[in-house]
Amino acid sequence: MKRRQFLVGGAALSVLGASSVRSRAQTDASLEKTSLTLGVGGKPLLYYLPLTIAERRGFFKEEGLDVAINDFGGGSKSLQALIGGSVDAVTGAYEHTIRMQVKGQDIRALCELGRFPAIVIAVRKELADKIKSSADFAGYKIGVTAPGSSTALTAQYAMVKAGLKANDAPLIGIGGGASAVAAIKQGQVDIISHLDPVIAKLESDGDIEVLIDTRTEAGTRALFGGSNPAAVLYVKKEFADENPNTSRALVKAFVKSLKWIHDASPEEIADAVPVEYLLGDKPLYLKAVKSSLPTYSLDGVLTMEGMQSVLNTLKTLDPQFAQADVDLAATFDDRFIQG
């Protein structure tokens, strides 16, 4: 009897396994493109946690995708890679979609990953008595992930809002992770515009004094006057049009990732990322995760208020946007997140 039960059970498992394989094969067959290259600018940063979780939890594979990730160290560099054709998609700042539209490049966000910028601007502790606000930034070196990135944009916007010019302080690319921490500790830069866990590490070590904090809704509204979407998944419009099923699969993987992040504990998140992302201090990383959790998108959908806020920021910073005719509806393609 036991042998018969075992054989029946084994047959059932075989049927289930075959069904799963067929289902996966059908999914793969419906995708126009199964192997993709995705660009990112500073993958260890919590700004891009949804990407790391989608990769580490196997959400890309569940959707039939084989995704190779290229980390370019800064958002502007990953954008260049997309324009140049060396990557198929990018996780990067939403504002790049607006910039490219003005330049005649049709780049579209497919899914919101961060609803607040999560960028912190801080000064080296020993300069805190001289630099008390963004009005004091002139002439000091500001460390950003890369010139042209969202960390650079935020620092420049803070200066302009305080009455300075966007070029009153030099922007120094310091990358993400350990290199950014070292830049402050070694005095290579005076001010830093950056993200967790870099900021959490520098705060914990007593190396910086925080001046502006957009990890919260209150801090975001204080600087930008409204919500201000951050990281998104974006592609060229032609890619989305030619690969609708693949685009939908990518979006589904990221939506799964966002849901997992909101359902998980900080400990589960820390255990899911590569150990080097912890910067040698897991308790500190847990603290950084807790600070960053409110910044992640709840459903992946960009709001018009948020998109308008980013456009207003660009108009303040760059004269070419002041009179530009920007169609914000064309910067977010919601076909794949709604379907």
Image (cartoon, grey):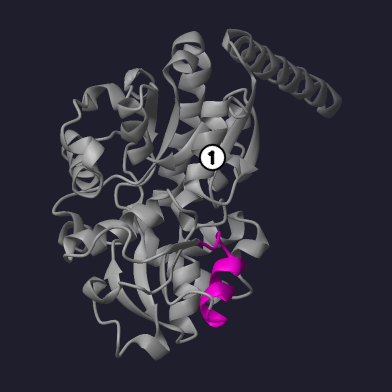
Residue positioned 37% across, 30% down in the render: 100
* Side of 321 where 9 appears, left or right: right
Queried whether the magenta region covers residue 184, the answer comes back as yes
Number of numbered discs overlaid on the protein picture: 1
Label 1 sits on a secondary structure element that is helix
Image position, residue 4 (x, y; %): 82, 21
Quadrant position of the C terminus in the picture: top left
Please state which of residues 248 and 72 is positioned toward the viewer in this rendering: 72
Quadrant position of the N terminus in the picture: top right
Using a 10 Å C-alpha cutoff, classify the residue at mark 1 as few (fewer than 14 neighbours), some (14 to 19) or many (20 or more).
many
Please name the amino acid that badge 1 sits on.
Answer: Ser
Please state which of residues 307 and 143 is positioned toward the viewer in this rendering: 143
Q: Is residue 175 visible?
A: yes
Start and end of the magenta stretch? 173-187
Image position, residue 107 (x, y; %): 40, 25
Task: Identify the residue under disc 1.
Answer: 78
Residue 135 found in image quarter: bottom left
Name above or below for residue 202 compared with residue 17: below
Residue positioned 44% across, 11% down in the render: 241
Residue positioned 13% across, 54% down in the render: 225
